[in-house]
Amino acid sequence: MAGERDWKQYENQIYERLKEMAGEDAAVEPDASLPGRFSRVDRQVDVHVRGSFAGAIASGTMAVDCKCFTRKVNVKDVEAFMGSSTTSARTSGSW
């Protein structure tokens, strides 16, 4: 990872941690494309998790958008994430 931008290192750290937490019952994919729920246009997500995560009873899909803010997250940041997560074909979003 030497020479990578800080944000890419951060994404890789989140991916590795989620892969470790997920266990064998979930597939964890970095830098994935998901079709938009309404537009069907592919949207990029930093980490996509499919299956039964960390021993959960139900199976599902999680889209993770990695952000490494150096300031407090404001309402506009949250609204932007909510907008992107509700238009992606997934069941839950994570930031």
Image (spheres, rainbow, N blue to C red):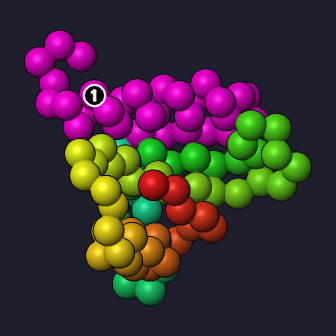
Q: Residue at x 48, y 26 (%)?
A: 16
Q: Is residue 20 visible?
A: yes
Q: Residue at x 48, y 40 (%)?
A: 29
Q: Residues within 10 Å of mark 1 (few under 14, many from 20)?
A: some
* 60 on left or right of 8: right
**Residues rendered magenta in the picture:** 1-30
Residue 77: x %, y % from top left: 31, 68
Residue 20, above or below 64:
above
SS state under label 1: helix
- Residue closer to the observer: 40 or 66: 66
Q: Residue at x 58, y 55 (%)?
A: 62
Residue sitting farthest toward the front: 72
Q: Amino acid at mark 1?
A: Gln
Residue 14, above or below 56:
above
Which secondary structure type mostly characterizes the magenta part of the structure?
Answer: helix
Please tell me whether residue 2 belongs to the stretch shown in magenta: yes
Residue 58: x %, y % from top left: 83, 55
* 36 on left or right of 26: left
Residue 45, above or below 85:
above
**In which quadrant is the C terminus drawn?**
bottom left
- Residue closer to the observer: 18 or 33: 18
Q: Which residue is mark 1?
A: 9
Q: Residue at x 32, y 49 (%)?
A: 67
* 2 on left or right of 88: left
Residue 6: x %, y % from top left: 19, 31
| Quarter of image, res 14 | top left
Please tell me whether residue 11 belongs to the stretch shown in magenta: yes
